[in-house]
Image (cartoon, helix red, strand yellow):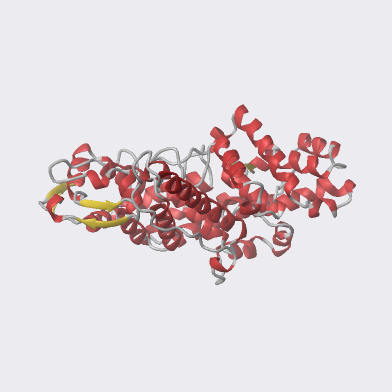
Amino acid sequence: MEAKRVETARLFHRFGFGPKPGEYAAALKAGIPATRKKVLTLSQTPNSSVVSDPQISDLGKRPAANSPQIIDFAVARRRQIQDMQLWWLDLMVLSPNSLVEKMSWFWHGHWATSIEKVEYALPMYLQNKTLREYCLTDFTKLAKAMINDGALQVWLDGQDSTVKAPNENLARELMELFTLGVNRYTEQDVKEMARVLTGYQVERTTGQVKINPSRQDKNPVTIFGSTMTLSSESLTELLVKRKDCQQFIPERIWYRFISSSEKMPANFAAIKAFSSRDISQAVSATVNSPVMANPKYEMVKSPVEWFVAACRALEVVPSQLQTSDKLINHLDKLGQVPFSPPNVGGWPAGEGWLSSASALYRVAFANWLVPQSQLSVIRETSISDRTRKSADWLGVPEWSARTKAVLDENSADPEQFTLMALCSPDYIVSR
């Protein structure tokens, strides 16, 4: 398999959501350095010029059960959640800044927070805006913003943590999942840190956060062997400054962008690049790393990554598909709906997305999706050239002999041909 085609495909699929028609072939002509630069260069075009922001408002407290207002409330809440989901899927497909969408998606899985517990769309929407604002900036700023995020506080029971009854959920996950990693702290550190994080109160419907001094433990704590007085923000800064954080965040970047099965090498360039805690430097080091061309680092596309890449190739917009309910239902069956990660650890990666059940659901999804595209790229290509040219269309380095045979067999039927290509192992897995 040609290394140039592999690396170019990875730049599109891993640091964006796949190529639009013509982009992959153009990138092959431009060369790897030019494609890396293009991936890392942010467009000045505002997202709002391509996708309108959703109308997410404060719905107020849930009316009493069986009251006349409860049905209108439930309908409005459901509409806001779906509008928010479609807004983000549309941005993934249409935004001129694919890297911003991909990094926002990465951080959504890192600081995993679900609408299932938060309940209201507004706090989740505000969290998403925070993630996209800081997704390629200073990790210290991102971490401080997240510790003060209303949705995350609700998700990890921060608003129930008081000086009389410190809750350890947020303290534990702040170290284990968000800043340091497993086995890089002690249980005593958790207990002490939980005391620092007391006093938060969250207005559930808006996500607005405040500190109630009467519920807050302001006494000195002993963390990592040192005794000091900390606020939630100075505590977060302390964690981010630790050497373990410089190791942990590149580990997460490796796991989500390079390989979920192979261990990160000690000399991975993103580690040194993250010494200043600049996320963009770590991402740039990853994009420019030699590991990008190593054939052993395959990655399975998650359901959302697969669906968005298909939409870009098919030139369809998620919110315009028939119908939005069916779209969300298809994603739900595949196990991945934006704003609904299954737990605080986020979604799985790798072969967990390749079960026999998911294969059937993916075919059903493609069967619903493909007829909604004009398939202009395929229809404008001669039947004899469809298999060869479709690899460039979808950003696939090379079709396997088995996939080629299947595509050749279906080349006279544009819809069936496309369905087979989208559901082939060569497309589902980023080679």
Residue found farthest to the bottom: 44
x and y, in percent, of residue 327 in the image: 61, 44
Q: Residue at x 44, y 41 (%)?
A: 346
Residue at screen point 82% across, 45% down: 414
Q: Position of residue 266 (x, y in %)?
A: 43, 46
Task: Choose between 19 and 93: the one closer to the eye.
Answer: 93
- Percent across and percent down for residue 90 are 59, 56
Residue 57 position by quadrant: bottom left
Residue 421 seen from this side: yes
- Residue for point 35% across, 48% down: 178
Q: Name the foreground residue: 86 vs 135.
A: 86
At which x and y percent is residue 330?
60, 39
Is 195 on the left-hand or right-hand side of 421? left
Q: Please indicate whether residue 174 sits to the left or right of residue 279 in the image.
A: left
Which residue is more in the foreground, 269 or 235? 235
Q: Is residue 352 left or right of residue 195?
A: right
Please identify the residue farthest to the front as the structure is shown.
Answer: 68
The image quadrant where one finds the N terminus is: top right
Q: Quadrant of the C terminus?
A: top right
Determine the residue located farthest toward the top in the rendered image.
356
Q: Is residue 301 visible?
A: no
Task: Report the residue that reaches farthest toward the left.
Answer: 219
Along the viewing direction, whichever of 383 and 94 lies nearer the viewer:
94
Q: How many marks?
A: 0
